[in-house]
Amino acid sequence: MDRPRHQGMAKNTCMRWRLPLVCLLWEVAMIVLFGVFVRFSAEADAHWEEEKQEMNLTSDIENDFYFRYPSFQDVHVMIFVGFGFLMTFLKRYGFGAVGFNFLLAAFGIQWALLMQGWFHSFKDGKILIGVENLINADFCVGSVCIAFGAILGKTSPIQLLVMTLFQVTLFSVNEYILLNLLHVKDAGGSMTIHTFGAYFGLTVTRVLYRPNLEQSKDKQGSVYHSDLFAMIGTLYLWMYWPSFNSAISDHGDAQHRSAINTYCSLAACVLTTMAFSSMLQKKGKLDMVHIQNATLAGGVAVGTSAEMMLTPYGSLIVGSISGIVSTVGYVYFTPFLESRLHIQDTCGIHNLHAMPGLIGGIVGAITAAAATEDVYGKEGFIKAFDFTGEYQTRTPSIQGGFQAAGIVVSLLMAFAGGAIVGGILKLPIWGDAAAENCFEDGVYWEV
Amino acid sequence: MDRPRHQGMAKNTCMRWRLPLVCLLWEVAMIVLFGVFVRFSAEADAHWEEEKQEMNLTSDIENDFYFRYPSFQDVHVMIFVGFGFLMTFLKRYGFGAVGFNFLLAAFGIQWALLMQGWFHSFKDGKILIGVENLINADFCVGSVCIAFGAILGKTSPIQLLVMTLFQVTLFSVNEYILLNLLHVKDAGGSMTIHTFGAYFGLTVTRVLYRPNLEQSKDKQGSVYHSDLFAMIGTLYLWMYWPSFNSAISDHGDAQHRSAINTYCSLAACVLTTMAFSSMLQKKGKLDMVHIQNATLAGGVAVGTSAEMMLTPYGSLIVGSISGIVSTVGYVYFTPFLESRLHIQDTCGIHNLHAMPGLIGGIVGAITAAAATEDVYGKEGFIKAFDFTGEYQTRTPSIQGGFQAAGIVVSLLMAFAGGAIVGGILKLPIWGDAAAENCFEDGVYWEV
Amino acid sequence: MDRPRHQGMAKNTCMRWRLPLVCLLWEVAMIVLFGVFVRFSAEADAHWEEEKQEMNLTSDIENDFYFRYPSFQDVHVMIFVGFGFLMTFLKRYGFGAVGFNFLLAAFGIQWALLMQGWFHSFKDGKILIGVENLINADFCVGSVCIAFGAILGKTSPIQLLVMTLFQVTLFSVNEYILLNLLHVKDAGGSMTIHTFGAYFGLTVTRVLYRPNLEQSKDKQGSVYHSDLFAMIGTLYLWMYWPSFNSAISDHGDAQHRSAINTYCSLAACVLTTMAFSSMLQKKGKLDMVHIQNATLAGGVAVGTSAEMMLTPYGSLIVGSISGIVSTVGYVYFTPFLESRLHIQDTCGIHNLHAMPGLIGGIVGAITAAAATEDVYGKEGFIKAFDFTGEYQTRTPSIQGGFQAAGIVVSLLMAFAGGAIVGGILKLPIWGDAAAENCFEDGVYWEV
């Protein structure tokens, strides 16, 4: 595994033919598959006029577009500006952060529309897409952006595209198992997006362990203005997280409640993050790494339960805890993971997504198990957990058990998938940079 | 009041125990109070299904969430990115600007949900919150962000948290007096947010007057890129101001009209700001300080009247005037306030919020006084000013008088509150920096 | 045309009286014209309560505000942050990029409300404005922002205001010819905004040709952080383009479909742009100029057809092609245009707006010509192309012909208008900088 420095320097990072080939071949594949499979859903099709009459709708405002489009746009900003800029903190890797995030997300959403479409929106041989599919595709790619955070600066764009292809596939399988087979609720994706995405990425970066990475240690820091660019990403993720967690919840009270719970959780998270950031430094000074990242843990940690009757004070508690866990993680766990477990986690996704994702899954299981008809109302109870059809007899405690099972499945999928994909990415054909050239835009960009 | 330099240097700015203690204690208090008081409003509660039937609503789209959530998100961006980045213009205080704004706003919205809830959403011992409460909490915190602008770079994060606690409290009392006792209209907050927030902040900074501040004069300027970061804040405030002024207006025409009036006022304001910025410089060059700030005065100045029948040309007039007043303020008033009145106003909130806020209150009073049934329609007239119940007999001219009274009350509350809070902040226990270390991130941040 | 260096240095760029004069005179003119002509539309007027009853609307949610306001805000961000920051890539012209864009757009939207109002919203001597007019005003100004891209760094703010005045006027005439006389569909403005705006700007910059521009060649490049600022502009344009193309489409399926088609087209465009950016460089490195610009061509190229039944795979094809054309344009056409045709196109709008705009017009014509009742449904077909009244008998193929005619008209208007306006801007009274001072903020800004 150890490569001496001179060998590293000899690595061929030239993308001239490999990257265009991959991009163009895959785009052609997308066009063919979309041509065969993808059509507009009833609400986006020009037949909507007739559909409206059939469905007895009196107004165009009943089109799902108006229930979800504003949230979709917020989620879209989170994926492209939020994740993209969050990772610009590195002093010499801003182009790679925002540019490769752009590349992988743009590819990923196309492949996600197909994969998720086959599982969830397939009808008479066609995938029918509407605004909810766009949100779900963005969500799916969100898990790839998270994994990207672990390997930021150490991989070639081709590796990122290969990882995206596989991760989107596995995400969709995992999501299908959770939502359809286990009948689990996870509208904000604590399990499907964060737990899965983060442990997948951590496994990949473990497999791709670079023992000589200290050669580029000086480039792993930030400079003053790169930290401000990163704060743009942080704030957009933070501000729009209520939209993230409510985007695909049921119309009405569920979307409304999701947004409120997330708002509360995130507000509390900022305070505990600031408190621990100051407390854990000898001089009591605040660390931008914590402010940029741990303040967001509150959104992750209510991803499953936000649409449930978590209540505002429940959200404050969850947010407070997740801010503490995440900040402590940055100070103690990240160095430990690197030195002992050889997990090099560039952005600290273990602190921002993995642990808070687990908290989110657990809180979701508990909140579900604690649900009562009294709290939800008779109809609200059935609607909130979709206890209809074959799930008519499911009780809250059983639901809680299935929610917990969802966490385990997500973890297993992440570890297994990450190990396999990490192995593939280790092949010496993808053009990744030598250790001393990591975290350096000059390798893949005209600077 | 004068402290010699060496005394200043000896100040203990270490936050290690004080900041965590304050943050954690207060977050625990929030959790307890939320636990006792805060629940979901009917439209965010799982009982909504039953509520819908009772209220005879046929569709989930009638949930207030869909009327206000897009505006809420815009307002949220204004508070966190808008105010946060607007203040990053200082060359060495970008972390403090965006980070402390983040801290105080995240704390403030929690406390505001409680304070405003007790006054406005209290029912059977519980505060019932929905999307409108989130907007109002953001609004309330907006007034703190404004006051922060006056003391930017000169206070410790603990001082900011203490100020937030008191200012949110006073804001809520003042708001209650205006909206409930005086029955005043102020949807965009010219009086409650801007006039109150700005004069409160100016009073605080007067009390905290630092005679030796010229010691850090070199750090009070901007650099090229910090000015561009600030423009991000400016533009988000400018673009989303129509959402700010319309966010809590009545459904339908009032929200629609508010957005249009604000759009027009802001457009006009840009032109007069540019004109006066060029005219008042010897060489006719534009000054980024004016472009970053005075262009926003048009939004402040229609804060009260935007939802009224101000008309588009009325908005152009108000916007034009406020741009001129604000720019002239930056050139002539700010130096005067500092040298003569010892008011050190880092961001020039006197020009951006105080004077335009007063203009906004006055324009609102005049517009209300000039209202006629002819212009509003019989029903529209009653709805616009809520002339129902005990206010059934109120005439436009009386309403105008009460509007004017609202300005006076806001000013008195701001002066009195600012003086008291300023006095508290002057205690030598909060860890503020010495004059020569002001405007310098290194004091509170790992740089 | 050649001016020796010393002559250039003698140019008077002082704005002190000229800029204020123009701004203030024009703002006064706006106030007068708004006073005479502009009133609220029925949905923004306080008479809405009565209007609702007349129109038999049961809920305020039927107000057009709720159909279009979220899209309006997205478009607003594209015009002010999107275009403004996209142009900050120049190392020493960030203030000019974002500041002059702000100035011209703020003026332009006022004049556009009038011009477009006279053509489209004029009733009983008054222009009645609502949220759709605000969107259209932003759209109109978008075409000026595009043209600004061609002359960026080489003109005075007065020249920009003069150009805005004329271009908004011509835009409105061209739009009227296309939409009303030719009955052409162009909701996302491939023809009216992009083709017209870009060829207008290219003609203007041709007329203003500066033979000695290589004197400021060193300032025409970017620095690391200016490229990151530009990516903020790029991403906001990219993310919100689905809102741009769907903002004024018919309620319901048409808005929904527009957003989906645009989303797909843009995703594909990113992949082909990255592919060709790498392929066309000797070392295979990616070029930020391409990523910042060519990735957006996919939004331009479906501007006409997005609301039609283009289908998702059709969108992928169009997006893929436009990314390739645009990137190739940056590598080969831009240098050619400059050296052979003396067209100095600072931002490369020929690649981002002109060619993709033409593609968009052509794709729109083809998609319209290929429409069938089978694909659209009987009612959907009539609604999509508005084949009612005097257009009842128009067939798809005839519609396709008129769409094609729309491209030609837009081109002719752009060339003729650009030549005239370019001639006016060449007068030596506007205070433009000498060649050696181009691309330098210090000329018009306090730095």
Image (cartoon, coloured by chain):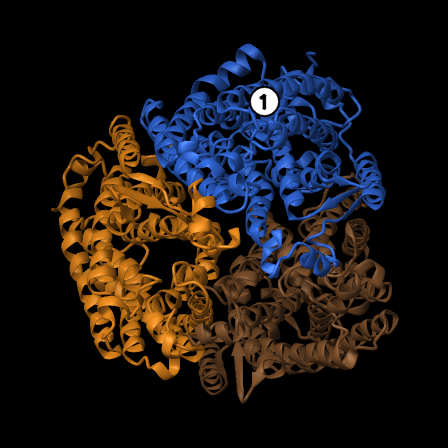
Chain colours: A orange, B brown, C blue
**Against A57, is B12 above or below?**
below
- Closest to the observer: C14 or B414? B414
**Against A313, is C425 above or below?**
above
Residue located beneath label 1 in the image: C406
- Closest to the observer: A220 or A350? A350
Quadrant in the rendering for residue C113: top right
Residue B161 position in % (x across, y down): 56, 76
Mark 1, Cα crowd under 10 Å, few <14 / some 14-19 / many 20+, is many
- Closest to the observer: C177 or B293? C177
Q: Is B355 placed left or right of C416 in the picture?
A: right
Q: Is A267 placed left or right of C54 in the picture?
A: left
Question: Residue, x 67% and y 36% (percent of image)?
Answer: C442
Q: Is A54 placed left or right of C282 in the picture?
A: right
Disc 1 secondary structure class? helix
Q: Residue furthest left?
A: A1
Question: Residue, x 25% and y 39% (percent of image)?
Answer: A433
In the rendered picture of this protein, how many numbered marks are placed on residues? 1
**Against B413, is C215 above or below?**
above
Tell me the kind of residue under disc 1: Gly
Q: Quadrant of the C terminus of chain C?
A: top right
Residue B130 position in % (x across, y down): 52, 72
Question: Residue, x 38% and y 74% (percent of image)?
Answer: A380
Could one spot residue C167 in this view of the protein? yes
Q: Quadrant of the N terminus of chain C?
A: top right
Residue A235 position in % (x across, y down): 48, 58
Chain letter of the residue carrying label 1: C
